Image (cartoon, rainbow, N blue to C red):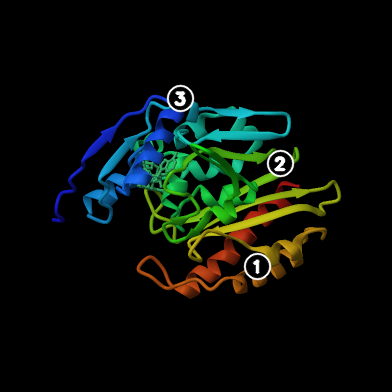
Amino acid sequence: MPELVRIEDYHIPQTVEETLELLAAETKRGREVALLAGGTDILVRMREGRMQPRVIIQIEALDELRGITETETSLRIGARVTFAELLASPLIERHARVISLACFEIGAPQIQSRGTVGGQLGTASPVGDLIPPLLVLDAEVLCRSVDDERRIPIGDFVKGVGKNDLRPDELILGVEFPKPPPGAHGLWHKMGPRRAQSISKVSFAGLVHLDKRKRVALCRLAYGAVAVTAIRARETEALLTSQALTPALIREAQALVQTEFSPITDLRSTESYRRKMCGVMLRRGLSGLLEQG
Ligand SMILES: Cc1cc2nc3c(=O)[nH]c(=O)nc-3n(C[C@H](O)[C@H](O)[C@H](O)COP(=O)(O)OP(=O)(O)OC[C@H]3O[C@@H](n4cnc5c(N)ncnc54)[C@H](O)[C@@H]3O)c2cc1C
């Protein structure tokens, strides 16, 4: 049993401004701070002794980080929005179904009702199921400190296993992305050791738009758990874009995507299985689109 962590201060700010002041002050003092959102990652890490913050800032009360809003061209999701709220959102279902499909397979209802978008980005795990959908939606992460505000493309924000571009004095406000063109299809597939409550061996998200002649007008593909971060399959996207979607093209894309990454072998899966599954998931997703007409 690891030694119990001694927390020196526990704050429950009521506004974003108050939170940013606390973060700025603690960054100057040099004490390790943890923001506590849903707690589904951080509490596990603390209990296992992998994280020992001296200060906890609970951000549950920050209503400014709640809500899913739209403009004519974009969608914004607050950092405190939970997976369950994403699942229940008609806006997400209409404009970003790839997110609903992924959230449906995250953990169990208990995790879905606690885990948040900000927590997923804060943890920056290569198996985080929300990150491939955010990659194909071209999302930007909105971050703020006392004297700065930044918009960071999600592909630049997530830097490695457990590493992100967030500075110690910054708070994630949420994510924003352009609405996909009407008729664009969201694709999602997750392979885990079992059907429910499983961590991905490989996950796949796609955003594909076919024009009236079944030509691929837009194609974005991303995979989780095949590299140190979730990653876009740029070569396969280029192969498919502007081509008529046919069974032969799908086979070619399946073969290519299997060569795009260098996955690792770990306790969850092997390099060769992961590579093969990248192709199988893509084939299933694109074949499904062809069958739907
Ligand atoms: C049993 C179980 C099953 C799970 N299954 C899945 C699964 O199937 N798929 C999956 O993807 N994940 C899964 N998870 C992981 C977890 O639920 C997600 O990563 C979730 O998004 C974490 O969100 P949270 O709000 O609980 O984060 P927390 O644990 O509260 O925080 C996580 C990290 O993010 C930081 N943080 C949180 N909010 C902000 C913010 N606004 N600004 C800056 N930093 C912030 C925290 O400081 C901390 O470092 C599972 C976890 C458990 C315990």
Residue at 38% from the left image edge and 24% from the top image edge: 14
From the viewer's perspective, is the residue at label 3 or at label 2 nearer? 3
Helix, strand or loop at disc 1?
A: helix
| Mark linked to residue 254 | 1
Residue 36 as seen in the image, left or right of residue 219: left
Q: Tell me if mark 1 has few (under 14), some (14-19) or many (20+) residues whose alpha carbon lies within 10 angstroms of its own.
A: many
Callout 1 amino acid: Gln
The residues tagged by marks 2 and 1 sit, at their Cα atoms, a distance apart of 24 Å
Mark 2, Cα crowd under 10 Å, few <14 / some 14-19 / many 20+, is many
Dot 2 corresponds to which residue? 180
The residue sitting at 73% across, 34% down in the picture is 73
As helix, strand or loop, the secondary structure at mark 2 comes to loop
Amino acid type, callout 2: Pro
Tag 3 and tag 1, C-beta contact below 8 Å: no
Percent across and percent down for residue 182 are 75, 37
Q: Secondary structure at mark 3?
A: helix
Q: Position of residue 159 (x, y in %)?
A: 50, 59
Camera-side residue of 202 and 57: 57
Q: From the viewer's perspective, is 36 left or right of 62?
A: left
| Residue 229 at x, y percent in the picture | 50, 60
Specify the farthest residue to the right.
213
The Cα–Cα distance between marks 3 and 2, rounded to whole angstroms, is 27 Å
Query: In this picture, is 292 found above or below 90?
Result: below
| Picture coordinates of residue 168, whole percent (x, y) | 42, 48
**Sequence-wise first label, 3 or 2:** 3
According to the image, label 3 marks what residue?
63
Residue 37 visible in the displayed image = no
Tag nearer the camera, 3 or 1: 3
